[in-house]
Image (cartoon, grey):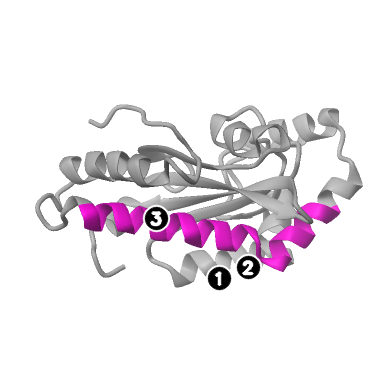
């Protein structure tokens, strides 16, 4: 079993960190022997760029900007989070965050790319703006994948460990990228990259 690896990725360190993470995934996977270290490294760098590109999509930026402008209070965020976690059913809020314009953009991307199993967009407080499929909780602000990427408003890419994702029940690596609007970090996009992607050179 792979140990927990959490890597804040700065531009200068991205090459080395991607290699370490992907080498660990490769050694633990049934695909061992298919890819060499350079190919593994390239795979993750491609996905980092994909997630960063998604985070800069105007649909995502606009959705986060609008939710930030609504100034959701923490009390309301916590109420929604409790309701979200307590219900395993598709509540009205879960349906709304999949069906809004940003949610449709995430759904179309996840369904188009076999390498991605989930994507969710959050505001400057870590509250969900759009999701596909529904996350296990509504508020991401207390989780490292959000806090490390938002980085107190100084956004950066963050790579999580290879682990079983509760909401999709598949093994994946989550890549978090800042949502940037006019040079300011206003939210975070988190995307799950599946183990099957890491095992295949042609994805």
Measured from the top left, where is residue 129 in percent x and y?
72, 51
Label 1 sits on a secondary structure element that is helix
Disc number placed over residue 108 in the picture, else none: 1
Q: Please state the horizontal and vertical placement of residue 29, each as a whole percent of the image.
A: 18, 46
Mark positioned earlier in the residue sequence (2 or 3): 3
x, y (%) of residue 109? 53, 68
Dot 1 alpha-carbon crowd within 10 angstroms: few under 14, some 14 to 19, many 20 or more: few
Marks 2, 3: nearer the viewer = 3
**Viewer-side residue, 157 vs 147:** 157
- Distance Cα–Cα, label 2 vs label 1: 5 Å
Dot 2 and dot 1 residues touching (CB under 8 Å): yes
Secondary-structure class at tag 3: helix
Q: Measured along the vertical axis of the image, is residue 149 above or below residue 35?
A: above
Position of the N terminus, as image quadrant, is top left
* Span of residues in magenta: 38-66
Report the residue at 89% width, 41% height from top.
71
137 is higher (above) or lower (below) than 202: above
Question: Looking at the image, which is closer to me, 150 or 189?
Answer: 150
Is the stretch drawn in magenta largely helix, strand or loop? helix
- Is 65 inside the magenta-drawn segment? yes
Residues at marks 2 and 3 touching, judged by CB atoms closer than 8 Å: no
Residue where numbered disc 2 is placed: 105
Foreground pick, 116 / 150: 150
Instruction: Measuring from the top left, give residue 175's x and y in whole percent.
Output: 48, 47
**Regarding mark 2 in the picture, which secondary structure is present there?**
helix
Disc 2 to disc 3, how far (Cα)?
22 Å
Mark yes or no: residue 170 visible. no
Q: Residue at x 23, y 54 (%)?
A: 38
Q: Which residue is mark 3?
A: 45
Front position in the image: 93 or 127: 127
In terms of sequence position, does the residue under pointer 3 or pointer 1 come before the other? 3
């Amino acid at each position: 079993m792979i140990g927990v690896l959490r890597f804040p990725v700065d531009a200068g360190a991205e090459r080395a960190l991607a290699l370490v993470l992907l080498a660990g995934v490769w050694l633990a996977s049934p695909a061992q022997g298919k890819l060499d270290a350079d190919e593994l490294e390239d795979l993750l760098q491609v996905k980092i760029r994909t997630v960063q590109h998604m985070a800069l999509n105007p649909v995502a930026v606009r959705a986060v900007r609008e939710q930030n402008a609504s100034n959701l209070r923490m009390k309301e965020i916590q109420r929604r989070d409790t309701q979200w976690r307590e219900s395993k059913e598709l509540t009205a809020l879960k349906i709304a965050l999949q069906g809004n314009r940003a949610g449709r953009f995430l759904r179309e991307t996840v369904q188009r790319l076999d390498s991605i199993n989930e994507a969710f967009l959050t505001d400057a407080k870590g509250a969900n703006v759009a999701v596909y499929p529904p996350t296990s909780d509504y508020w991401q602000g207390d989780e490292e994948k959000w806090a490390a990427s938002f980085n107190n408003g100084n956004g950066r890419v963050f790579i999580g460990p290879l682990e079983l994702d509760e909401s999709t029940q598949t093994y994946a690596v989550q890549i978090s990228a800042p949502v940037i609007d006019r040079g300011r970090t206003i939210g975070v996009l988190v995307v799950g990259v599946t183990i099957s992607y890491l095992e295949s050179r042609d994805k």
